[in-house]
Image (tube, rainbow, N blue to C red):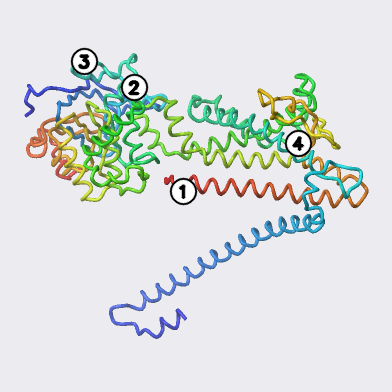
């Protein structure tokens, strides 16, 4: 169409033929380049849909296999020898308590470490070394953390195969994620904002507390939630420290009706978590238990998606008021 | 000519400055700032104007490896603000700064202005309200924002944001205000507003302004310093600099033959 347009317009005396020829070449070139745009977006879309399709297939497969177990009994029953009446109660309570410890361990430590590295630590070869190591820690296989925890927490510190041990282990596991996301969110704050705060006479801590933390907590929170979502699904380190696979009791409640209303006995209790419960059911020969495993898998994926979705939403909501 | 009886608010004595890595950015600069006057720093990019300005609130201390030599003495107390024993925070409490690009905090208009006071430990609501209002009036912004003090500062226009930054710098009653090319990111009308504001502010305090805009220096300042390659080439009252500069280099720069 473009070329017919061109030929219908008679070259006037003021536009020499060479200009029109040139223009034709430029247009052909633009067309070629645009083809690359189109091609790439096609490849990208293909890759994306492949990834999404895989996830959806996996999820749907689990849902189809396990949907008959999606009822309240499944969440309020202990595991049982009969697949039909076996439930997740001890597993989800265990997961929740372990996550609580993980959160309490990883967040203050990770945020403080990230803040220190970014705001206080002198920039030299030593801080570079620490930075490389922190990034490396994020890539260490989780079973190695399990071995470390078995040696350190279970044997040396004598914490036993408890909720506390599991929480500490997963806390260590996601620590690098929290540190890296803290540093990245802090780095996103422009120098001009920092200088503005210093220029009115703020101390370093005032700058950190009033500005750096306030403007970066959206990003930090995102990192924390993504780390927690990873911890929720971790199986290997929990098995390594010797979590039980069949538990028909709940840990003592963290809150009680007599003063001081909270107790810490639950920390030293034995426990199981969702992925271990799933693993346990999966390793049974009886097919009926596989249905339970599928249902558990679907629930873990759903929880992970939910957590990541919350992270994205919170980041959007918090970033809305900050423009730079 | 500069009247020798004009009171001096601060002066740099034999000031040398070295950036991390050794770049000798200021070379033996001797320059007084006269009280309740506007002093403009002009010169081509990289001549050290901003470096010089940022010595006055010790901004260079934020980055490791920078080194000062010489003195900047503030009057009437004769404090050398570059001395090791003098905390840069103390200096910044006396000398405030307005930056090149408006840089309000992502907080409300009110909190932006109040921040300097909060840093000084002021928490009395009435006191804060009064100070914020006074500073916003001083920055000629009060009428435009008085009904939306709790709005985010980012919702203001560029010129309003810059006046907000001036209010923030003003709220703490500084003795000297530093302006680092305060209008280079603004349109002509906003620029005129800021210039007018500076002329009013000098009733109360002393101003040092870096500018790339020769007309601005001519319009707004009482004294003008021409810097080149880290040296102070010429310093005189603005009228003299722009009509009968004593050095050929200055004349070439202000007439646009160079730079």
For disc 3, the marked residue is B77
The mark found on residue B88 in the picture is 2
Q: Nearer the viewer, mark 3 or mark 1?
A: 1
Read off the residue under disc 1: A320
The subunit letter for the residue under badge 2 reads B
> How far is mark 3 from mark 2, CA to CA?
16 Å
For the residues bearing labels 2 and 4, Cβ distance under 8 angstroms: no
C-alpha gap between disc 4 and disc 1: 36 Å
Q: Residues within 10 Å of mark 2 (few under 14, many from 20)?
A: many
Name the quadrant containing residue B169. Answer: top left
**In the rendering, at what x and y percent does residue A66 appear?**
81, 54
Taking the spot 32% from the left edge, 26% from the top edge, the residue there is B24
In this view of the protein, which residue sits in the foreground, A244 or B213?
A244
Q: Residues within 10 Å of mark 4 (few under 14, many from 20)?
A: many
The quarter of the displayed image where residue A87 is located: top right
Residue A94's mark?
A: 4
Which one is earlier in the sequence, the residue at label 3 or at label 2? 3
């Amino acid at each position: 169409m473009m070329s017919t347009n061109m030929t219908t317009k008679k070259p006037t005396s003021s536009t020499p033929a060479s200009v029109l020829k040139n223009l034709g070449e430029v247009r052909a070139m633009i067309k070629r380049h645009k083809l690359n745009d189109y091609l790439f977006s096609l490849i990208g879309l293909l890759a994306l849909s492949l990834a999404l399709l895989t996830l959806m297939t996996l999820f749907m497969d689990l849902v189809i296999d396990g949907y008959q177990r999606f009822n309240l009994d499944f969440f309020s029953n202990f595991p049982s020898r009969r697949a039909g009446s076996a439930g997740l109660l001890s597993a989800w309570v265990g997961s929740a308590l372990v996550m609580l410890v993980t959160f309490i361990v990883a967040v203050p430590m990770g945020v403080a470490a990230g803040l220190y590295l970014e705001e206080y630590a002198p920039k030299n070869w030593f801080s570079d070394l620490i930075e490389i190591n922190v990034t490396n820690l994020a890539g260490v296989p989780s079973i190695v953390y399990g071995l470390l925890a078995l040696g350190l927490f279970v044997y040396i510190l004598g914490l036993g195969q408890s909720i506390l041990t599991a929480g500490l282990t997963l806390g260590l596991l996601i620590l690098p994620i929290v540190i890296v996301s803290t540093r990245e969110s802090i780095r996103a704050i422009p120098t001009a904002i920092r200088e503005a705060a210093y220029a009115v006479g703020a101390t370093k801590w005032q700058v950190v507390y009033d500005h750096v933390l306030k403007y970066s907590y959206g990003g930090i929170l995102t990192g924390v939630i993504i780390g927690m979502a990873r911890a929720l699904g971790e199986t290997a380190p929990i098995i390594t420290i010797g979590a039980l696979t069949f538990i028909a009791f709940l840990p003592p409640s963290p809150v009680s009706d007599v003063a001081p209303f909270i107790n810490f006995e639950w920390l030293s209790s034995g426990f199981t978590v969702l992925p271990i419960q799933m693993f346990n059911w999966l390793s049974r020969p009886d097919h009926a238990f596989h249905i339970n495993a599928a249902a558990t898998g679907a629930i873990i994926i759903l929880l992970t998606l939910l957590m990541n979705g919350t992270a994205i939403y919170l980041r959007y909501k918090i970033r809305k008021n900050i423009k730079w | 000519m500069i009247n020798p009886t004009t009171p001096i608010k601060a002066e740099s004595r034999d000031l040398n400055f070295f950036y991390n890595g050794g770049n000798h950015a200021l070379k033996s600069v001797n320059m007084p700032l006269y009280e309740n006057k506007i002093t403009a720093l002009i010169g081509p990019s990289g001549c050290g104007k901003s470096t010089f300005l940022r010595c006055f609130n010790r901004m260079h201390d934020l980055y490791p490896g920078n080194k000062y030599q010489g003195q900047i003495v503030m009057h009437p107390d004769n404090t050398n603000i570059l001395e090791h024993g003098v905390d840069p925070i103390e200096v910044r409490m006396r000398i405030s700064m307005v930056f090149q690009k408006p840089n309000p905090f992502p907080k409300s208009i009110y909190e932006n202005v109040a921040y300097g006071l909060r840093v000084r430990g002021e928490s009395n609501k009435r006191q804060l309200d009064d100070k914020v209002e006074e500073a916003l009036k001083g920055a000629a912004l009060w009428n435009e924002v008085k009904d939306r003090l709790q709005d985010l500062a980012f919702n203001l226009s560029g010129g309003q944001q810059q006046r907000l930054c001036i209010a923030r710098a003003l709220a703490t009653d500084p003795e000297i205000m530093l302006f680092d090319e305060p209008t280079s990111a603004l349109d002509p009308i906003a620029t005129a507003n800021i210039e007018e504001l500076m002329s009013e502010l000098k009733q109360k305090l002393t101003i040092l302004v870096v500018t790339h805009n020769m007309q601005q220096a001519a319009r707004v300042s009482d004294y003008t310093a021409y810097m080149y390659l880290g040296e102070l080439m010429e310093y005189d009252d603005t009228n003299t600099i722009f009509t009968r500069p004593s050095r050929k280099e200055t004349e070439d720069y202000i007439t646009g033959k160079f730079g």
